[in-house]
Amino acid sequence: MKMRVRSLLAVALVVAVVVGFQIPAALAQRNRDIVVVGMAQEPDGLMMAFHSMAAGAAVNNSLLKGMVEYNDKWQLYPITVEKVPTLKDGDWELLPGGKMKVTWKFRKNFTWHDGKQYTALDASWTNLMLRNPRSPTVSRTVIRKIDNMLVPNSNDPFTLVVQWNERYPFANIGHTVYPRHVLEKDYLRDPGQLKANKQNRFPIGNGPYKMAEWVAGSHMTLEAYDKYPLGVAKIKRQTWRFILDSTVLQANAIAGQVDVTEINNITDCGALEQIERRNSNVQGHYTPALIWEHVDLNLDNEWLRDKRVRQAIAHALDRAAIAEIACSGGRQPVAHAWLPERHEGYNKDVKKYTFDLARARALLAEAGFTMGPDGFLRDRAGKRFEMTIMTTAGNALREQVQQIMKDQLKAVGLDLRIDNRPAGVLFGQTTARRQFPHMVMYAWLMTPASLGNTLWKSDQIPTAANNWEGQNYPGFRHEENDRLLTQIETEIDTAKRVAMLKRQQEIWAEELPSIPLYFRLHLTTSPKAVRGVSPAGLAGTYINWNSSEWVWSQ
């Protein structure tokens, strides 16, 4: 309770500082040609095939539209293509030998922001670029299922044929497309240096907004693209402000200095409720989502490779209380595995780790730990039991959770040290190259098509040998888990796929490569005066997914 009071007091003090400045009349009355988006992270890049930060993906919702995307109803809809292929319509075909063919028809009226035509040739080239092992591609698990991505008729650059070498249940969710004419020269020079291409910092997109400026450490400015074929954006400019301290960001929302908030800005319901109370012009959005808050464990560590130690940590944490701090009233349920309830593979019957200090102590004793004279455990070699936890610096809720974890783990003899990093560092190097020694806390945002193949298969552990491909940051290795995930990602039959996903959840909950905390609501804000805002709560579909349709009411 004292921690919560201090948090609220800090917000109150920051608000006093923010509103102590005179707000210009133009800001107070808000220019109807501009919307200001505040977020607590600055992207580490905007080519999301090379990065994992949600901040970059959020900005891309305005800059770069996909072939198809999910809407706020979690339904796929076509954007740069004429339709979503289906088995029923015959443009998605199941072939002998477990192979498939999917045919896409690109719209002919899309252009890149530099005026060049957007075509299926860009998609075909992007596939070749991303599958090159020297390119800094985050994961190739889906790309490897594709034999060819062809434009079969040189006179028709708008028809793309994708030849799959195995079944994949989500072959109709589209493919990454980048402008070949922007990237090819640097690609031919050195694929490993593509993150340095201007496309990663000042991208040529195809969306309703184009990049105008990126001032590092401050903001991005996007301007409406006047040739966007699905309707020119009604609001002429978006300014994305990077306010890395969530408490300061909350104060800015209260003071009206930002219009919209997105990406880990507000991570607890109390903060959002306070914004609504103190600024009657703000609409808070409590959106059911596929967001999993958790703590990854480095399973290569001498202690954490022992399953009993991992399970002891889970038993030593009052995760229900942590979830209540985030959002009271059970609005954000405790997680017992990694898939949220609204995902088809959710399994309510997995092993659960209740808050049980006696069980935690017993497991640690089984693992060979004994109590030292200072109140902390020692392993069999006499080494003091201490670990480090990392998270995104400036995130007030996560920092509060770290303190709670530190206190609770102390009760079982584990000395937890806190060592946080800016989001760009945490997601750019610390996780992507597995540079966290013990624990790292963050969230995964998912879609209905998330199957866990990039997160939990052993061939997705990032290493120097595989050019840091994959997102299996804990380093989870389990033979049956690998076999199941391989089968899951080729199973077209939904019932069979769900059954295997549920079994995978059972294995995961027993082995516990991460400590599941809770499933988050997607907490965002927007002005009541802006019509059309409809958050979705999915990875890749952020609050600005339909921002070209937003309009300030008069």
Image: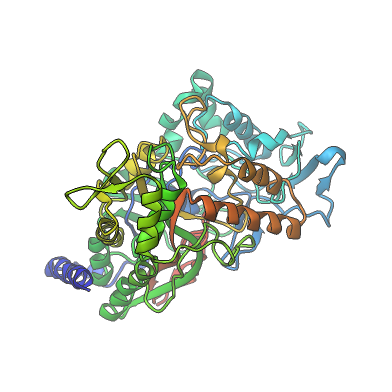
Q: Is residue 408 left or right of residue 49?
A: left
Looking at the image, how many numbered discs can be counted on the residues?
0
- Colour mode? rainbow
Q: Position of residue 401 (x, y in %)?
A: 30, 61
Q: Position of residue 48 (x, y in %)?
A: 49, 42
The image position of residue 75, as x and y in percent, is 64, 63
> Which residue is outermost to the right?
96
Instruction: Using residue 446 as the reference point, say whether residue 435 is left or right of it.
Output: left
In the image shown, does 480 or 260 lie closer to the viewer? 480
Comparing 389 with 423, the one in front is 389
In this rendering, the answer to whether 130 lies above or below 142 is above
Q: Image quadrant of residue 324? A: bottom left
Q: Is residue 407 above or below residue 119?
A: below
Q: Quadrant of the C terminus?
A: bottom left
Question: Percent position (x, y) of residue 262?
Answer: 39, 61
The answer to whether residue 78 shows anywhere in this view is no
The residue most toward the top is 189
Quarter occupied by the N terminus: bottom left
Residue 214 against residue 449 in the figure, above or below: above
Q: Residue at x 37, y 76 (%)?
A: 328
Which quadrant would residue 276 be assigned to in this image? bottom left
- Residue at 46 percent across and 70 percent down: it is 333
- Of residues 188 and 167, the one drawn nearer to the viewer in this rendering: 167
Does the image show residue 426?
yes
* 285 relative position to 98: left or right: left
